[in-house]
Amino acid sequence: MSTPNGFRKLVISVMIPLMVASGVSTVPELAFAQTTTPDPAQPDTYSTPLKQPEYQRTNRYDKTDIPVQLLGINDLHGGLDTTGTAYIGSHPYPNTGTVGRLAAYLNQAQHQFKRVHHSKNTFRIEAGDMVGAAPADSSLLAHESTMHALRAMKFQIGTLGNHEFDRGLPEFNRILRGEGGTGQRGFVGQKLSQRTD
């Protein structure tokens, strides 16, 4: 992305669908946003992100750029089936969440990017707190369900948040490697099947 305009479009085309899908709001004053009502005179530009012009075609000024798409999530906290209401600006988006819906949005965004830009340069990134402070369907299964879901969604790059270390470094290594827990191989365990136990 050699142009600032191209970078802005990348951020908008990637983050908005993910924010709506995962129930994340970037509005700092979330408490105030929840008490306001949408302005009917303002069109909802986020409800159908695939119809936005910059999501449908490449801007002629950006045709010499190398198209790269970054699909990122953070703070999943093992919320595999968690739903709620997300707020973007003052507009509520009810019933957002669940990893199934998130996976569908990631696949949709990647497919649309490949179709419009003829590029396979998509990277799926998780930015920490994927586990920890989690509902029972993750924590009671030693977070293996969450790690399997992340692997199924084909995340390639990950960073660590504070909740990855809630139970110390040995427990984080167990979660990452898929050792112990429920007895199944975890996130990395499928690729470590050659080792002897």
Image (tube, helix red, strand yellow):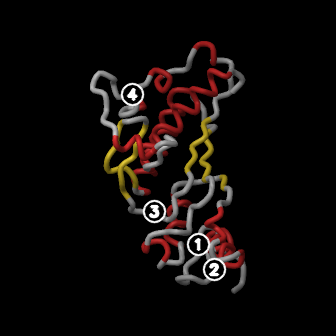
Is residue 152 shown left or right of residue 1?
A: left
The answer to which of marks 3 and 4 sits earlier in the sequence is 4
Relative to residue 76, is residue 114 depicted above or below?
above
Q: Which residue is mark 4?
A: 45
Q: Which residue is mark 2?
A: 179
The answer to which of marks 1 and 3 sits earlier in the sequence is 3
Q: Which residue is mark 1?
A: 186
Question: What amino acid type should be assigned to the residue bearing mark 2?
Answer: Glu
Q: Are marks 3 and 2 in contact (CB under 8 Å)?
A: no
Question: What amino acid type should be assigned to the residue bearing mark 3?
Answer: Gly
The answer to which of marks 1 and 4 sits earlier in the sequence is 4
Q: Secondary structure at mark 1?
A: loop
Q: Camera-side residue: 4 or 185?
A: 4
Q: How many marks?
A: 4
In the rendered image, the residue lying farthest to the left is 40
Where residue 98 sits in the image (x, y, percent)?
Answer: 40, 57
Measured in 3D between alpha carbons, the distance from the residue under mark 2 to the one under mark 1, in whole angstroms, is: 7 Å
Measured in 3D between alpha carbons, the distance from the residue under mark 1 to the one under mark 4, in whole angstroms, is: 39 Å
Measured in 3D between alpha carbons, the distance from the residue under mark 1 to the one under mark 3, in whole angstroms, is: 17 Å
Q: Are marks 1 and 3 in contact (CB under 8 Å)?
A: no
Q: Quadrant of the N terminus?
A: top right
Q: Secondary structure at mark 2?
A: loop
- The residue located at (61%, 84%) in the rendering is 180
The answer to which of marks 3 and 2 sits earlier in the sequence is 3
In the rendered image, the residue lying farthest to the bottom is 197
User: Mark 2 packing: few (<14 Cα in 10 Å), some, or many (20+)?
Assistant: some
Q: Which residue is mark 3?
A: 79
